[in-house]
Image (spheres, rainbow, N blue to C red):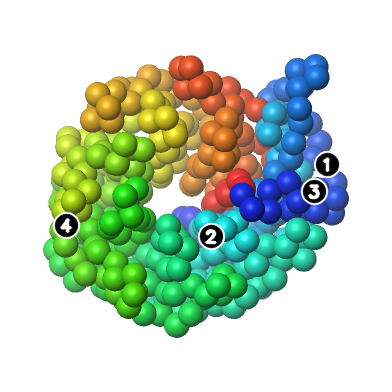
């Protein structure tokens, strides 16, 4: 499946939210007849708050955005109010925030891949700090190491992963490493490696890179002085599985893979001492026959439930997490309220789940029931041009 932009695809907290909200008109309420649920009214006397929301897009796509979208959301109702755009970033298709909350990082998903840093300002005067080449093509994912001193990125088209140092002001330094996945051979129907995600394990001891093109997850140890990666293990998925995104259980001994091409979710054991990931058997997404191109899994902070975004089925699958993380049990699927949910994210308190719907150019919002994990529509859908990433702060 081609992953080029043209074909497929908190520290500032309330201060930043207030600044963005003052610059943006309120989003109109939606009714069921308009294509989505109206935001629910807050209970009488309930405290209200707004927080910032950032939205990634493809600037090169027809109908795409002009940079990183800003917005705010109501923490009780989920209603979104859109704000100005942070310009000067090309194809910011994935976003990640620094642990300090003061800087956001974006991939520049294009042939000459790059990563860009943006300083977030309480007065809304957000400032692009600069960009650095990733050394590869088509970066689709990035993450900040828990120390806040290294930026990790995955180049999809060229099948490589990169490391950049981060300065005290959040700016990005010159690349310190680039590792290309030269083996094993590509999986069925693939023309080469396609690194789709790079994340740090919960214990902070290892970095894992998910490669869709060769059905492999690589485990690296990051030298936090030199900024270099050393491979310590690799996990093979079933040929043609197409692993795309991995999410860890908070216990740190299990992780879950969304496999794009064979339409499965895979429970993996994880050894934090050696970094070894051991995949189990792929299981159903609840979307019926055929493939629905699963995009991403999320796990609740208490480790009780997991959610999977299904792009072809336009749904969210809910799983119960059992056996201390060792098992997923399918509960149900719910319509996402948009077309092609590319990425999903929890609000910081875990009470809301946001979905970026690429083909319908919308963001939809759900409440998460803490008792049973059930999802119910909240604010939205809200227009967001070619929404491919949503980052609630």
Residue 278, relative to residue 177: is it above or below? above
Q: Work out whether mark 2 precedes mark 3 in sequence or the reverse, and give the earlier one.
A: 3
Residue at 31% in and 36% down = 251
User: Residue 372 appears at what percent x and percent y?
Assistant: 46, 17
Q: In front: mark 1 or mark 4? A: 4
Q: CA distance from mark 4 to mark 2?
A: 28 Å
User: Residue 272 appears at what percent x and percent y?
Assistant: 22, 48
Q: In front: mark 4 or mark 2? A: 2
Of 343 and 34, the residue lying toward us: 343
Where is mark 2, residue-wise? 98
Q: Work out whether mark 2 precedes mark 1 in sequence or the reverse, and give the earlier one.
A: 1
Which quarter shows the N terminus?
bottom left
Residue contact at pointers 4 and 2, CB within 8 angstroms: no
Q: Work out whether mark 3 precedes mark 4 in sequence or the reverse, and give the earlier one.
A: 3
Quarter-of-image position of residue 134:
bottom left
Query: In the displayed structure, does residue 199 sit left or right of residue 71?
Result: left
User: Residue 250 appears at what percent x and percent y?
Assistant: 36, 38
Query: In the displayed structure, does residue 158 sit left or right of residue 54?
Result: left
Q: Work out whether mark 1 precedes mark 4 in sequence or the reverse, and give the earlier one.
A: 1
Where is mark 3, residue-wise? 18
Q: CA distance from mark 1 to mark 4?
A: 48 Å
Disc 1 element: loop
Disc 3 element: helix
Q: Which mark is residue 290?
A: none
Where is mark 1, residue-wise? 26
Of 139 and 76, the residue lying toward us: 76
Q: In front: mark 2 or mark 1? A: 2
Where is mark 4, residue-wise? 234
Q: CA distance from mark 2 to mark 1?
A: 28 Å
Disc 4 element: strand
């Amino acid at each position: 499946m081609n992953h080029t932009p043209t074909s497929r695809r908190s520290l500032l907290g309330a201060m930043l939210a207030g600044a963005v909200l003052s610059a943006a008109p309120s989003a109109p309420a939606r009714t069921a007849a308009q294509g989505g649920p109206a935001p629910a009214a807050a209970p009488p006397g309930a405290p209200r708050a707004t927080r910032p929301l950032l939205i990634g897009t493809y600037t090169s796509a027809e109908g795409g955005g002009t940079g990183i979208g800003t917005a705010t959301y109501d923490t009780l109702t989920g209603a979104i109010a859109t704000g100005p755009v942070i310009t000067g970033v090309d194809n910011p298709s994935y976003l990640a925030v620094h642990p300090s909350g003061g800087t956001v990082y974006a991939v520049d998903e294009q042939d000459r891949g790059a990563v860009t840093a943006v300083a977030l300002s309480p007065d809304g005067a957000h400032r692009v700090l600069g960009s650095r080449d990733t050394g590869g093509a088509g970066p689709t994912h990035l993450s900040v190491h828990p120390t806040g001193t290294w930026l990790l990125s995955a180049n999809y088209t060229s099948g490589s992963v990169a490391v950049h140092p981060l300065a005290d002001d959040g700016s990005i330094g010159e690349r310190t490493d680039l590792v290309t996945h030269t083996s094993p051979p590509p999986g069925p129907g693939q023309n080469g490696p396609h690194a789709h995600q790079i994340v740090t394990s919960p214990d902070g001891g290892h970095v894992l890179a998910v490669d869709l093109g060769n059905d492999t997850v690589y485990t690296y140890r990051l030298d936090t002085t030199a900024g270099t990666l050393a491979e310590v293990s690799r996990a093979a998925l079933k040929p043609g599985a197409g692993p795309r995104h991995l999410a860890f259980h908070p216990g740190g001994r299990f992780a879950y893979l969304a496999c794009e091409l064979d339409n499965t979710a895979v429970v993996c054991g994880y050894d934090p001492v050696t970094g070894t990931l051991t995949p189990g058997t792929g299981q159903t997404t609840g979307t019926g026959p055929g493939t629905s191109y699963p995009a991403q899994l999320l796990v609740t902070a208490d480790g009780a439930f997991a959610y999977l975004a299904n792009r072809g089925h336009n749904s969210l699958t809910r799983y119960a997490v059992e056996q201390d993380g060792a098992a997923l049990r399918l509960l149900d699927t719910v319509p996402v309220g948009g077309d092609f949910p590319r990425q999903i994210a929890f609000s910081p308190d875990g009470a809301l789940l946001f979905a970026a719907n690429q083909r319908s150019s919308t963001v939809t919002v759900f409440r998460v029931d803490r008792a049973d994990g059930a999802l119910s529509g909240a604010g939205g859908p809200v227009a967001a041009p070619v929404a491919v990433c949503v980052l609630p702060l």
